[in-house]
Amino acid sequence: MASTLTRWLRTLSPDALVDLLGRRPEALTPPAPRDLAELAARLQGRAGVALAFQSVPLPAVQVLETVCGYSCRTRAELAELLDAVSKIRNAVMHFRPNGISDDDSETLKRAVRLLRHLPSEP
């Protein structure tokens, strides 16, 4: 079965593929990949990822590392965490008389751990 990257590469127009390869020339070192599966393997292999990572701005790397390290594996999971924090905040701002639940407390602690590891603004 084809990898997610291989399937995505198949959706690219020829111009988009040329653009991608222009940004990742190491993927074309001899011997040239025989097909998109081999190209995908090079692009997502350890050496290829390390080279690509060098061009990512440090704040973006820090955010990625933090999000991955705190159980938010997808954009949807991060959005879900932030939405839960927002709902707790709204409840507290409207003077919830019984305080917050243990689950809400754990959600807030998880969010705080995540936010403490994000880079501060320069």
Image (cartoon, rainbow, N blue to C red):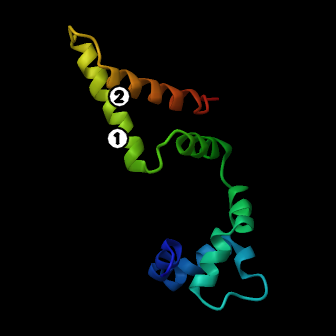
Q: Residue at x 66, y 48 (%)?
A: 57
Tell me the amino acid under the disc marked 1: Glu
Left or right of 95 in this view: 52: right
Name the residue beneath numbered marker 2.
85
Image location of residue 105, percent across then percent down: 37, 21
The residue tagged with tag 2: helix, strand or loop?
helix
**Would you call the spot at circle 2 few (<14 residues within 10 Å), some (14-19), or many (20 or more)?**
many
Instruction: In the rendered view, tell whether residue 27 sits above or below residue 62.
Output: below
- Quick one: which residue is furthest to the front in this view? 102
Image location of residue 65, percent across then percent down: 61, 44
The residue tagged with tag 1: helix, strand or loop?
helix
Mark positioned earlier in the residue sequence (1 or 2):
1
How far is disc 1 from disc 2 in space, using C-alphas?
9 Å
Tell me the amino acid under the disc marked 2: Val
Instruction: In the rendered view, tell whether residue 87 sits above or below residue 42.
Output: above
Image location of residue 31, percent across then percent down: 77, 89
Instruction: In the rendered view, tell whether residue 69 sits above or below residue 122.
Output: below
Name the residue beneath numbered marker 1.
80
Q: Residue at x 79, y 86 (%)?
A: 30
